[in-house]
Image: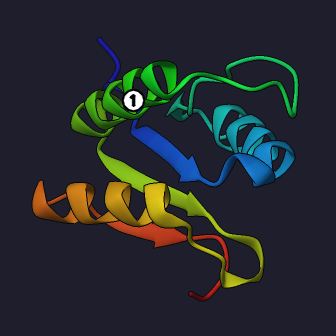
């Protein structure tokens, strides 16, 4: 039986949704299983605080499943939620890499 493919959790600000989709595509074509942030709807569509909290908690579970984390951070930007995810991943011993220098 073939070895399990690597699992990567993509993190980043929703403002970089297109860049995260591109990273997802590139990693998938490289044979990597990708766990990406949930998308709540069309860009700019508001979500409730309760929905945001649920999505944030779910994303932490995705980090738990991943072998490593890739932060999509054009221009070096890292927001509050992404900073929390990076700290969570590091505390769990997950390697974290970035698409751009932070």
Q: Nearer the viewer, residue 66 or 39?
A: 39
Specify the quadrant of the image occupied by residue 9: top left
Tell me the crowding category of disc 1: few under 14, some 14 to 19, or many 20 or more residues within 10 angstroms, Cα based: few
Q: Residue at x 33, y 59 (%)?
A: 84
Specify the quadrant of the image occupied by residue 55: top left
Residue 90 lies, in percent from the top left, at: 21, 65
Indicate left or right for 92 with 19 as reference: left
Query: What is the quadrant of the N terminus in the image?
Result: top left
Specify the quadrant of the image occupied by residue 67: top left
Q: Relative to 51, is 22 above or below?
A: below
Q: Residue at x 76, y 35 (%)?
A: 25
Q: What colouring style does the render use?
A: rainbow
Q: Residue at x 53, y 35 (%)?
A: 32
User: Extreme top residue here?
Assistant: 1
What kind of element bears circle 1?
A: helix
Q: Nearer the viewer, residue 86 or 24?
A: 86
Indicate left or right for 69 with 47 as reference: left
Residue 7 lies, in percent from the top left, at: 40, 35
Q: Relative to 19, is 40 above or below?
A: above
User: Extreme bottom residue here?
Assistant: 101
Q: Nearer the viewer, residue 38 or 10?
A: 38
Residue 98 lies, in percent from the top left, at: 55, 72
Q: Nearer the viewer, residue 78 or 30?
A: 78
Q: Relative to 91, is 21 above or below?
A: above
Residue 46 lies, in percent from the top left, at: 74, 26
Indicate left or right for 47 with 62 as reference: right
What residue is pinned by disc 1?
Answer: 53
């Amino acid at each position: 039986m073939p070895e399990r493919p690597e699992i990567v959790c993509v993190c980043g600000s929703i403002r970089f949704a297109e860049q995260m989709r591109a990273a997802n595509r590139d990693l998938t074509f490289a044979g990597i299983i990708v766990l990406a942030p949930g998308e709540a709807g069309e860009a700019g569509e508001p979500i409730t605080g309760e929905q945001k909290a649920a999505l944030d908690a779910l994303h932490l579970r995705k980090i738990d499943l991943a072998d490593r984390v890739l932060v999509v951070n054009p221009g070096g930007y890292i927001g509050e939620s992404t900073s929390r995810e990076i700290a969570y991943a590091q505390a769990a011993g997950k390697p974290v890499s970035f698409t751009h220098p932070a």
